[in-house]
Each structure stands twice: as structure tokens, then as C-alpha cells.
Image (cartoon, grey):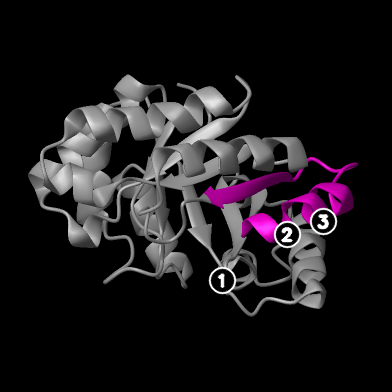
């Protein structure tokens, strides 16, 4: 059986508050290196800064696309994705076109995701945020299939700005749908080690949280460092 990476390497250390300052971003990057997190997840304005700070480390940089509503046009998402890759992002978390999904316009949903995938370098990890709190189970299943068809590498539960965050039920449904073909990222409301472990047990491959240090410190009370 393939061994899983340690918990800290399955965490995206996240700061998406609109009032985040340069001081906050520098602290985020410092913590990510200190604790050995997989990447930092930041708004587009901070990608180049993070890429520069983290250039000689094994911590990646993730940016969000069409965030947090997913309601910009496909061409805007594609342009944003391309710019973020040029700025140094190795991962992109894009918000699905929820209106199109709920309207049954599968071709538009597919084109929207595919535009981001095709605008990114082949090595860039594209994750599709479904905002499960606004979807029925059937819509979550359909969105997972469309994400896979469009070439995305992950599906993700939520933005953290929607009606609720990740649940064990969301993760289990997504994992059951994509099997081992795609990764599943749980995000939103993950603030304790207990919650993190429950979501991983349900099938999450990656966790997005701003409480990363708190979670890792709870795992190893001495210091939590990787």
C-alpha cells in the first residue's frame, strides 16, 4: 500500500481575507516553511510576493481563480489563470460556474473549467471548487464528473465564504464519485485536529485551512514542526 505523506504535507496554509497585509503574508510564508506545509493559498495580488519568498523552499504557491463566487466570464477566469501561473503559482483553485451547473448547462461548466486547465502549465494542479453548501448531491456528483472530463486534477468542497464549510458527507460523496482518479480537497471551517482527521478519513487528499499551525501543534504538542 502506498504510504501517505505526513499531515503537514497535506495542508494548504490559507489566507484569503481581503484585509490581509504584506506583514500577514510574510508571516504565512514563514509558518508554511517552519511547519512544512504543502503550499500557501492566497489571493492573486499576493502570488508573486509568495513565489519570491518561497523560491528556495519546497512550499508551493496556490492562487484562487474566479474567487469566491465563480461568476466572472470564462475568458476572465482563463486570463486570471494564465497570469497567476506567470506570477509563480503552481496550483490553482477555481470556482465552478454554479449558475450554469444549476441551469443544466453542462457544456458551459465544462468549457469554463477546461479554459483554466488549458491556460495553466501542464504541471500546474487545477482544483475545482464546487461550493457544496449550495449544491444538491446530484449536482455535486455531476460537477465532479465534469471537472474530471475537463482535465482538472482535484475537486474541492467549498470556498470558505459560502453557506458552510467542508463536511464528512461532502468529502465521502466526492471521493466515492471520483475514486482514485482525482484528489479531493476539503476546505472551510477546518479548525481542529479532530475535524481534519475526520475529513482525511472520509477521503480528503488535501485540506485547506487558516488554522494549520493550531492543527499541527495539536498533533505534536511539543512544537508540531515537520
Q: Secondary structure at mark 2?
A: helix
Q: CA distance from mark 3 to mark 1?
A: 21 Å
Q: Secondary structure at mark 1?
A: loop
Image position of 36 with respect to 17: above or below = above
Image quadrant in which you'd find residue 42: bottom right
Q: Are marks 2 and 3 in contact (CB under 8 Å)?
A: yes
Mark closest to the chain's N terminus, 3 or 1: 3
Drawn side of residue 77 relative to residue 138, left or right: right
Q: Secondary structure at mark 3?
A: helix
> Is 53 within the magenta?
yes
Image position of 183 with respect to 80: above or below = above
Image quadrant in which you'd find residue 164: bottom left
The x and y percentages for residue 138 are 9, 42
Q: Nearer the viewer, mark 3 or mark 1?
A: 3
Report the residue at 76% width, 64% height from top: 31
Drawn side of residue 91 relative to residue 130, left or right: right
Mark closest to the chain's N terminus, 1 or 2: 2
Residue at the disc numbered 1: 211
Other residues around mark 1 within 10 Å, as few (<14) / some (14–19) / many (≥20) = some
Front-most of residues 65 and 37: 65
Residue at the disc numbered 3: 49
- Quadrant containing the N terminus is top left
Image position of 84 with respect to 153: above or below = below
Report the residue at 72% width, 71% height from top: 222
Give the residues drawn in magenta, as a range: 42-64
Residue at the disc numbered 2: 46
Report the residue at 87% width, 49% height from top: 52
Image position of 43 with respect to 74: above or below = below
The x and y percentages for residue 92 are 55, 41
Report the residue at 57% width, 64% height from top: 219
From this viewpoint, which residue is outermost toward the right? 56
Amino acid at each position: 500500500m502506498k504510504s501517505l505523506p505526513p499531515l503537514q504535507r497535506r495542508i494548504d496554509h490559507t489566507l484569503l481575507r481581503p484585509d490581509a497585509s504584506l506583514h500577514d503574508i510574510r508571516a504565512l510564508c514563514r509558518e508554511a516553511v517552519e511547519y512544512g506545509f504543502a503550499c500557501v493559498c492566497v489571493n492573486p495580488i499576493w502570488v508573486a510576493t509568495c513565489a519570491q519568498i518561497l523560491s528556495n523552499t519546497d512550499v508551493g504557491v496556490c492562487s484562487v481563480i474566479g474567487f469566491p463566487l465563480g461568476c466572472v466570464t470564462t475568458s476572465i477566469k482563463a486570463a486570471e489563470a494564465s497570469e497567476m501561473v506567470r506570477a509563480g503559482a503552481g496550483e490553482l483553485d477555481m470556482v465552478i460556474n454554479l449558475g450554469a451547473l444549476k441551469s443544466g448547462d453542462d457544456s458551459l461548466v465544462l468549457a469554463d473549467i477546461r479554459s483554466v486547465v488549458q491556460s495553466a502549465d501542464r504541471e500546474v494542479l487545477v482544483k475545482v471548487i464546487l461550493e457544496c453548501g449550495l449544491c444538491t448531491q446530484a449536482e455535486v456528483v455531476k460537477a465532479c464528473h465534469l471537472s474530471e472530463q475537463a482535465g482538472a486534477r482535484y475537486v474541492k468542497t467549498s470556498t470558505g465564504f459560502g453557506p458552510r464549510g467542508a463536511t464528512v458527507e461532502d468529502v465521502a460523496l466526492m471521493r466515492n464519485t471520483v475514486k482514485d482518479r482525482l484528489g479531493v480537497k476539503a476546505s472551510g471551517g477546518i479548525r481542529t485536529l479532530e475535524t481534519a482527521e475526520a475529513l482525511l478519513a472520509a477521503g480528503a487528499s488535501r485540506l485547506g485551512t487558516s488554522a494549520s499551525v493550531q492543527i499541527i501543534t495539536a498533533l505534536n504538542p511539543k512544537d508540531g514542526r515537520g
